[in-house]
């Protein structure tokens, strides 16, 4: 990171922490949903051929698959942003999502818009996420759409992890 300005280093560091937080959330949701899906659909769930039908068009094996891999995680993420300001991954990395204007908590509408914005951010090769690297305020596409920003919340990671 030599040769980068202090602002660029901070932006890159926050971007990396945001990416790690997203990976941590994905890992957590997988750790919770995968055993349940294997329990419901049987041990062949992962190697099962693609089923036919309406849900299969999205790569889903049934209603439980839809609920545990899409609806449930999205609902939890929206609730975490609206009620706590952070998902478990953001808690672990000391990040918080706030209203871009006031710095206060998100409304439920902002949280839902941000979740929808994640889809748009991911579509063109994750360009909407990478946008945060070029944005002068370090905000990704979904932050701009929802009027949010991710800030450092010193001490937040200590709340999420037990002390000695």
Image (tube, helix red, strand yellow):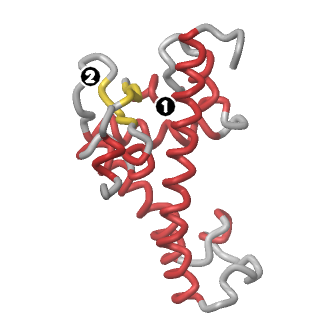
Mark sitting earlier along the chain (1/2): 2
Residue 163 on image: x %, y %: 30, 55
- Identify the residue position indicated by label 2 in the image: 103
Which quadrant of the structure image shows residue 34?
Answer: bottom right
**In the rendered view, does 87 fall on the left or right side of 11?**
left
Quadrant where the image shows the N terminus: top right
**Relative height, residue 38 to residue 147 (above, below):** below
Which residue corresponds to the image point at 66% horizontal and 39% vertical from the top-left?
123
Q: Looking at this rendering, what residue extends furthest in the front direction?
A: 164
Q: Residue at x 65, y 75 (%)?
A: 53
Question: Residue 105: horizontal and vertical position, in percent?
Answer: 23, 33
Residue 146: give x, y in percent of width and height: 39, 29
- Does residue 164 appear left or right of residue 24 in this picture? left
**Quadrant in the rendering for residue 132:** top right
Of 130 and 71, nearer the camera is 130
What residue appears at the point 58 percent right and 85 percent down from the top-left corner? 38
> Quick one: label 2, few (<14), some, or many (20+) residues within 10 Å?
few
Local secondary structure at mark 2: loop
Which image quarter holds the C terminus?
bottom left
Task: Say if 156 sits above or below 5 in the image.
Answer: below
Which residue carries the number 1 mark?
A: 142
């Amino acid at each position: 990171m030599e040769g980068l300005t202090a602002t660029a280093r901070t932006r890159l560091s926050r971007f990396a922490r945001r990416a790690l937080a997203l990976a941590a959330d994905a890992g957590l949701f997988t750790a919770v949903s995968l055993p349940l899906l294997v329990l419901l659909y049987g041990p062949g769930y992962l190697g099962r051929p693609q089923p036919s039908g309406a849900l299969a068009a999205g790569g889903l094996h049934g209603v439980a698959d839809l609920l545990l891999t899409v609806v449930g995680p999205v609902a939890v993420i929206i609730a975490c942003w609206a009620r706590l300001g952070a998902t478990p991954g953001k808690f672990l990395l000391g990040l918080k999502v706030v209203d871009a204007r006031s710095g206060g908590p998100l409304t439920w509408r902002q949280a839902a818009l941000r979740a929808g914005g994640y889809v748009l951010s991911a579509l063109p090769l994750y360009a909407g996420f990478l946008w945060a690297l070029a944005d002068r305020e370090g905000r990704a596409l979904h932050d701009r759409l929802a009027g949010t920003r991710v800030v450092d919340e010193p001490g937040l990671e200590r709340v999420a992890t037990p002390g000695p």
